Image (tube, helix red, strand yellow):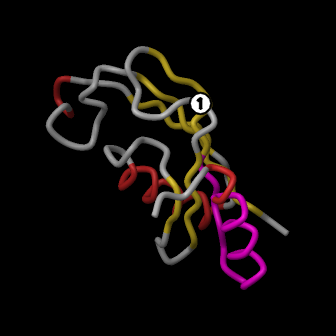
Amino acid sequence: MSITDADVLVTAEQWKRAGRKVALATVVETTGSAPRLAGARLVVDGEGNFAGSASGGCLEGDIVVESLEVIETGVARLLDFGVAEEVAWRGSLACGGHIKVYIEPIDG
């Protein structure tokens, strides 16, 4: 079953209420061919569980790792993903697009 971006926010709220540490990743900008549009969301808890999608799967692993760091430090960050020759074989955007993802810790 596919989870909508609105469901991601509900999941984030449920996880916070359950006492989990949570970070929210949101696509804030896309250029070229990108797998998800601005506004796409992914929620991650402190154990690495996640719901939603920020990149249709091609960058989720990197975003989860960065989200865990945001949870640990409490400091938000902006990630910039595009195609670079040296990383085209791993989890980059092989579609040729470019996305920016803002990850923020969710408190309270």
Q: Which residue is mark 1?
A: 38
| Residue drawn at x 47%, y 28% as measured from the top left | 99
Magenta stretch contains residue 24: yes
| Residue drawn at x 80%, y 65% as measured from the top left | 107
Q: Is residue 75 left or right of residue 99?
A: right
**Number of numbered labels in the structure image:** 1
In this view, 60 is above or below 93: below
Nearer the observer, 101 or 71: 101
Q: Is residue 94 left or right of residue 107?
A: left
Instruction: Classify residue 87 by image quadrant.
Output: top left
Q: Which residue sits furthest right? A: 108
Nearer the observer, 15 or 81: 15
Nearer the observer, 10 or 101: 10
| Residue drawn at x 61%, y 47% as measured from the top left | 103
Q: Which residue sits furthest front? A: 1
Magenta stretch contains residue 103: no
Within 10 angstroms of label 1, few (less than 14), some, or many (20 or more) residues? Answer: some
Give the image location of residue 17, x and y in percent. 78, 80
Q: Which residues are magenta?
A: 8-25
Give the image location of residue 27, x and y in percent. 57, 36
Give the image location of residue 31, x and y in percent. 47, 16
Instruction: Classify residue 55 by image quadrant.
Output: top left
In this view, 42 is above or below 11: above
Quadrant (top left, top right, bottom left, bottom right) of the C terminus: bottom right
Give the image location of residue 6, x and y in percent. 69, 52
